[in-house]
Amino acid sequence: MSLPLKPLVVGLLLSCSWQAQSADFSHLIVFGDSLSDAGQFPDGTDRSDPNFLSGKRFTNRTGADFSGPYAEVATQRLARQLGLGDLFPSTSPVRQAVGLEDGTDYATGGYTTAQILRSIREPGGSVVAAPDGTILRQRDGYLVSSPKADPDALYYLNGGGNDFFNGVITGVNSAQESAGRLVLGAKALADAGAETLVVSDLPDVSQTPAAAGSPALAAAKPLVQVFNAALGQGLATLNPRLQILRLDTNRLFDEVKADPARFGFATPDMFSAGEQLGNVCFDGRDGSCQTSTDFGVTQATADPDQLLFYDGVHPTARAQQVLADQAYSFFTASDELSLLTYFNQQILSHDQGALYDELEMGRSLSTGDWQLFARGAKQTVNTGDGYANARAESDDDHLMIGALYQYSDTVTLTAALSHQNADLDLKNSGSDYDIEGQTLHLGGQYRWSIFALEGQLNYGQQDVDSARRLALGVSRRTETGSTDAESLGAALRIKMNLVSDQGDRLMPYVGVKYLKSRVDGFKEDQLTSTSLDYEDFDNEAWLGEVGLGFRQSGQHGVIADIAWLKPLQREATDVSFSQQSYGGQADTLTFGGYKMEDESVRGQLGYFVNLSSGVRLNAAYHYWFADDDQSSVSVSAALTF
């Protein structure tokens, strides 16, 4: 068939662009004590004071002279990191008085584990009371007002410190009973439909400045260990549908004290004699601790950021950020690791397109001819700004060596081996993932009349080096690891060959691709408060494509291609991991990562030259029309004999 055609100058190359599907939560709902109190109590009594509305929080004040509002606690910081906005107190008398909506943080300073349990499940269980016992405000516990827990919310639970301070815990049995009350709270949430719960271990109260003046607290370490062990054992008995992320705060604080400078805190040589990071505080004017003579609020050199404790037991703002970052790091891990499967699929898809190109360029072979080819490509990818936690940039190198054999007038066979090297950098976190491997490709083309049927099978193996970077306050930590991966692909395409009077070819086509990538489970190298142990994870996708190719006739000319790509099946990669810090007691958590965009377009524009010696050279530029900014340049050479 002959058609008058004009040369095409735009085309596309298949790729996958990714859309954030991380662990998205509707709300953060908090139960606990002063460590996570978002401001239940009024800040003073002067309603005209700008600090009055924000409420009292149990950490240092902000401002140049430390007279501004209290800094945020860790749970408030975590809520913002997760994209959930401001976290407000649930039972604030101040917010009620001015007509503001209640928040979802039920944690209240001074709560024992019994009071925390009541704030979860009992009528009138959320109580904010003055030191003299006067009730400032009271409302029902969370599950009374919301009998069906929001399954899409993230729940947070901490407590136990006030059981020590108030003499509730005096021995092993009472420590186990206190931990059991937190377990009952978690069970109530699980029974009501909660699906994801963060539980903070009880920090070691014997290592706080308050313990310096309290023999009972100074000797509390064994009972803190009993409490945390009982907490872990009890949580392990709950409905497995409830995912439980525990926070090993004690290991984290040990890491801070072992290297305070790394976390931005004062080192031992910066303190006066007899003082150290764990036995002084920023503001001990209430008698709960010794105020630092170097960085305390009463000094000209006052600086709470140098200190771990604000008062006898509560962290400073800098320490609150470290705690928030520890929790946040676990939620970003699934986003980052899921990119390994998707970029592996992208690498495979790129090679599938390259093999199709070589089949098309070999159409002029005669029966019995062989054609050897070598092809190299450099690809860059910048993922879109819509990604929650893992905006990525990658530089990928591709090298393919293969052969075509013209078996008959209608059948062409091909085999190729490709080498890939991808360097994936995460813009937000600075994490770095390297993927290097080889892929075997087998394919062919069958032609009849104006039609051609093309297909291929692909199998590859890759080495993966992981360097997951995370913030811990001002510190940056790198959790390293290595593992293996494999990819499996198949592609089928049918196209028409429409020839103009000048011999130029216009080639409409439809096709389908299958892409699967699997990453073997692995442990991160070091045992830390943030290191993880990953299970195997994989992703597979079916993609349909409709495209139009163009090739000029003659010994040299333009080649171009444009296609629209639509996923026929796309699922987020589920990444499952456990925390190394808890060993066999660690729960396995599963969060979804990324999945392909709903559709994309690919384009290619190139030029070829056939030399008289049987050598063919060509080069092409490829661009991806999607949210991602992606492009590549490829060059190839072929020898026919």
Image (cartoon, rainbow, N blue to C red):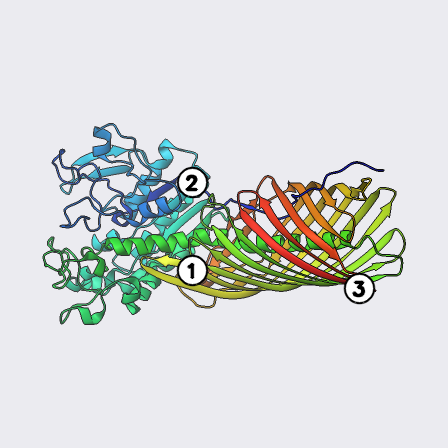
Above-or-below relation of 259 to 412: below
- For disc 1, the neighbor class at 10 Å (few under 14, some 14 to 19, many from 20) is some
Q: Quadrant of residue 348?
A: bottom right
- Residue position marked by numbered label 1 in the rendering: 469
Q: Earlier in the sequence, mark 2 or mark 3?
A: 2
Query: Is 528 left or right of 312, judged from the image as shown?
Result: right
Type of amino acid at the residue the image marks with label 3:
Ser
**Secondary structure under badge 1?**
strand
**Secondary structure under badge 3?**
loop
Q: Which mark is residue 72?
A: none
Q: Residue at x 18, y 48 (%)?
A: 63
Q: Comparing marks 2 and 3, which lies closer to the viewer?
A: 3
Q: Position of residue 32 (x, y in %)?
A: 30, 46
Q: Position of residue 143 (x, y in %)?
A: 38, 36
- Residue position marked by numbered label 3 in the rendering: 613
- Residue position marked by numbered label 2 in the rendering: 153
Q: Nearer the viewer, residue 492 or 178?
A: 492
